[in-house]
Image: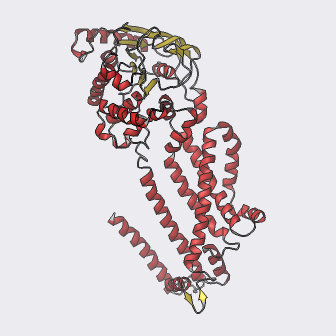
Amino acid sequence: MLRAVALRAGGVLALLAIWWGVAATHLWSEVFVPSPGAVWHQLVQTSTTHGGQRGYGGHLLYEHLLASLRRILLGSLYGVVGGIVLGLVIGLVPTARALLGPLVTFVRTLPPLAYFSLLIIWFGIDESPKIVLLFVAALPPVAVATADAVRGVHVDYVFAARSLGAGRWQIPLRIVLPSILPEIITGVRVAVGVAYTTVVAAETVNGVPGIGGMIRDAQRYNQTDVVVLGLLTIGASGLLIDGLLQLAERRLVPWRGKS
Amino acid sequence: MRPSDSPTSTSDAQAVTGGQQVTGGQAAAVSLDAVSVTYGGDRRLGGLLGRTDTVDALCEVGTDIPGGEFVTIVGPSGCGKSTLLRLVAGFVRPSRGEVRVAGEPVTGPGPDRGVVFQQPRLFPWLNVRRNVEFGLRMTGVPAADRRTRTAELLDLVGLSEAAARLPHELSGGMQQRAAIARALAPGPGILLMDEPFAALDALTRERLQEELRQIWRRTGTTVLFVTHSVDEAVLLGTRIIALSRRPGRVVLDETSTLPREESPHAHPGFLALREKLAATVRAAAA
């Protein structure tokens, strides 16, 4: 445990050292490789009100982050719920599999940005198209994982339950859903990951406050240190959330890999 | 045949099965009428999960099993003995012929027939108590009765201490004990067991065989027990049915006269019956 923590901390420190070293050589200008110090300075600047300027673009860094996280959480929440329901239906009903399976695969192969334009035409440029985009992006992987997991449930669990008096309509909720809980949690992690990779793209249109919007604006003004700060912020929050999900997994499915 | 002396009259039996047991009365507990199976798994339930298991074929199997018997079904691998059990359980439909339980044609699985699989198939998300309780919940037993029945059953299989543990925290033998308690919970008249001890080590298997015999005597449940072990078949069965190689036909159907009160290993009849059965199975497998 201690060793693992030490290894991780060491890895981060080593990367920082390399970054600092490369920046210190001044082989490339600050516009290409901002120094760790410059990024740290921006962290302070964007987190405070200084000289009448509030954070970056009128919002503090944590407000940008919260706006992005809100979109990520709402989008992946809808995506996970929709994906589980769709996956159960596809996995349990052969007709639904034939009808919806190709559609899900089709949507899954589309790059989210390809349909973002369509969503803007339909929903405008406020919150709705962003959250719908994350929902559409997060749903297919959950649906596919759920449907595959349903088909992997050993039929004897169903038979056991039926022999104990469970009716056919009790099987999906009583047996199938808890059986596939491990795969569903994996699906949630994938969905959150997809939402993370998509949110910055979603925020390129009217995305302030939002980390993506901040990065986009900073890029326009060649503020590379702010761009890097945005990347580090979104990445760190992603690590934190994935860690929480792993913790939840250990608590919720202690039997994973053991039965 | 021993329809009248089936051991159903002890107070233990009433306590454990809740008085719902099917005794050997007018109709046989299980009756198979020229049953053949020639195709894949139960399409109705199989379709629900999007899979169809292929099943070994059975050919014209017919037999009547009175209530209270402990029937062991033995035969070479792939002879359809599991299929026979799954027919009675209602997991598989016969292609021809009819399977009846207590006089009624089998149309699907039901809580009147408990099933124990080779793998315990305990629900991994429920602890031992909740697994045992599952059938009581499904059959609408009130909460207070559920608690006392579950406690009785856990006591019967010696798992009272492990009630709060999850299945993956138990040894294989304990898991199979829990599976037996779970199957007995709704008070089934018939207990169907598909090589339940095949995956256990020899010592655990012997102990569970002895415990199963005790449970059978105390509950009076009719047991259909599939095994590939000739020893196990002779050891446990009051009646032994041997099947031939696929497609399975009944090649031997013998009532055992070995005593049931203690382990029959030492009885002189044990070796004789064992030899006869082994020769039959060998011939059937050839």
Residue B166 in view of the camera:
yes
Q: Is residue A179 above or below residue B33?
A: below
| Residue closest to the far top | B1
Quadrant in which the C terminus of chain A appears? top left
B118 and B278: which is toward the camera: B118
Q: Quadrant of residue B254?
A: top left
Give the percent coordinates (x, y) of residue B13: 34, 21
- The coloring applied to the image is secondary structure
| Residue closest to the far bottom | A51
What residue lies at 50% left-to-right and 44% top-to-bottom? A178
Q: Is residue B225 above or below residue A152?
A: above
How many marks the image carries: the answer is 0
What residue lies at 49% left-to-right and 42% top-to-bottom? A179
Residue B286 in view of the camera:
no
Residue A35 vs residue B155: left or right? right
What residue lies at 60% left-to-right and 62% top-to-bottom? A74
Q: Quadrant of residue B46?
A: top right
B78 and A93: which is toward the camera: A93
Give the percent coordinates (x, y) of residue B136: 44, 33
Give the percent coordinates (x, y) of residue A26: 53, 87
Q: Is residue B122 above or below residue B259?
A: below
| Residue closest to the far right | A121
Quadrant in which the N terminus of chain A appears? bottom left
Give the percent coordinates (x, y) of residue B101: 49, 16
